[in-house]
Amino acid sequence: MIRGLTFVLAAMLIAFISQPEPANAGKYDAQFRQFLNSDVIPAARRAGVSQATLDRELAGLTPDTSLPGLVGPGGKGAPPKINFQAEFRSPQRYFRNSQFNSLVPGGRRLMKKHAATLKKIEARYGVPKRIILAIWARESGYGGAKIPHDALRVLATQAFMGQRADFFKGELIAALKILQKGDVSRRTMKSSWGGAMGQPQFLPSSYLKYAVDFDGDGKRNIWTSEVDTMASIANYLSEHGWVKGRDWGYEVFLPETLSCTREGPDNRQKISAFVKEGVKRVSGKPFPSQELGQPGNVLLPAGRYGPAFIATENFYVLKEYNESDTYALFVGHLADRYSGNKAFVADWKPMKDTTRGAVRNLQVRLEGLGHDVGGADGLIGFKTRRSIGKDQEKNGFFATCWVG
Ligand SMILES: [Ca+2]
């Protein structure tokens, strides 16, 4: 009897652990159904989603209140969008050698496995295979990462009670269109908790615009087809302006005579002009001849406290995938490491841990001095870096364009 009871309790415990339901599960179901009926269904019908699709996909759907960052029905009671208590992650911690070392072998293996297909993808879209592989690695570990959520449920929950409800309502309707077209089954259509789907982590609206069928089975399958995944990433970059024949950027030695305050894509000049000013590649090789007459710009993600780069326009195409210098640099650097696996030559100097709030205070001070920091958001972009540098120069110091 006791053993039996223990067994039942253990089974209950296991069930509880394996399927955690938040305390408020079910609390919003009626309100959610009302939201679907009055808000989502009419908008989806207007967007061309059939009643049959809506009946099939929305039947029995409930919100997943365990998702992070929810604020309540109607997006009411939203917390501040920026968490200024959050840690500001220094570049030094973002670019860990160990992480690149663990991603390089998988990429090389896939380049061999898909050599013929990647050649065709490169020819069609003009994006180098190493860039495609690096994005795939960053987004989902070449498809190895667990992407566990029912995309439709995530999107519906975010539309109902997330911080960006209207945005996600649009994505929910896009997801319904995808299911209506039949490229993917509901079971397979998985996303992250933020609604980014499949191996390239496309939002549904991006899927509709940029996903492609490259393995020829008639379905655009970014969930289980490696070939469709690679081609869809290439198509995305191509459609966002990837310049064929150009690289993303180069690590360089920046002479002290070239001020760090000249960083930024709004300070582009021909790469040959940088060479004249004494900029050299750290590899010791010259810039490829086709790059010399093309524009580039200084990129200093940690000011003078880290590696320096000449970035091409393609660096900013990578940022169309994820609006962050560190993301784009991670992808570009990983792409370079597939051959030779060479680390950055310059060190990322360690910096003291700080918060986004502290960064924002600095930005507000710089704004008070008349500098354009690109908005006091607690993140250090190139406008903040060069404002720091200009202030240092004004005060007679050698500009480092970095805090400290
Ligand atoms: Ca396909």
Image (cartoon, rainbow, N blue to C red):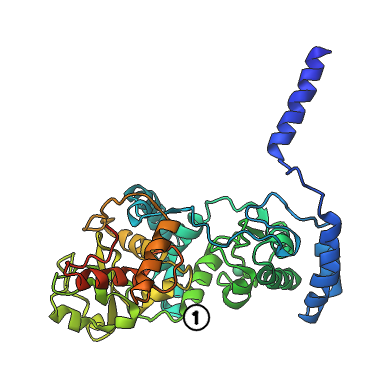
Residue 86 is left or right of residue 225, and the answer is left
Residue that appears at 44% across and 62% down: 378
Quadrant, the C terminus: bottom left
Cβ of disc 1 within 8 Å of ligand 1?
Answer: no
- Relative to 373, say whether 27 is above or below: above
Residue at image mark 1:
239
Q: Quadrant for ligand 1?
A: bottom right
Image coords of residue 308 (percent x, y): 24, 66
Residue that appears at 36% across and 53% down: 100
Residue that appears at 17% across and 67% down: 397
Quadrant, the N terminus: top right
Image coords of residue 272 (percent x, y): 19, 83
What is the secondary structure assignment of the residue under circle 1? helix
- Relative to 105, say whether 8 is above or below: above
Q: Which residue occupies the foreground of this view, 81 or 396?
A: 396
Question: Label 1: how many residues lie within 10 Å, few (<14), some (14-19) or many (20+)?
Answer: few
The quarter holding residue 112 reads: bottom left
Image coords of residue 247 (percent x, y): 32, 74
- Relative to 311, say whether 69 is above or below: above
* Residue 299 seen in this snapshot: yes
Residue 231 is left or right of residue 390, and the answer is right
Q: Which residue occupies the foreground of this view, 31 or 360?
A: 360
* Residue 59 seen in this snapshot: no
Figure label count: 1
Image coords of residue 224 (percent x, y): 60, 59
Amino acid found under the numbered disc labelled 1:
Glu
Residue farthest toward the front in the current orientation of the protein: 368
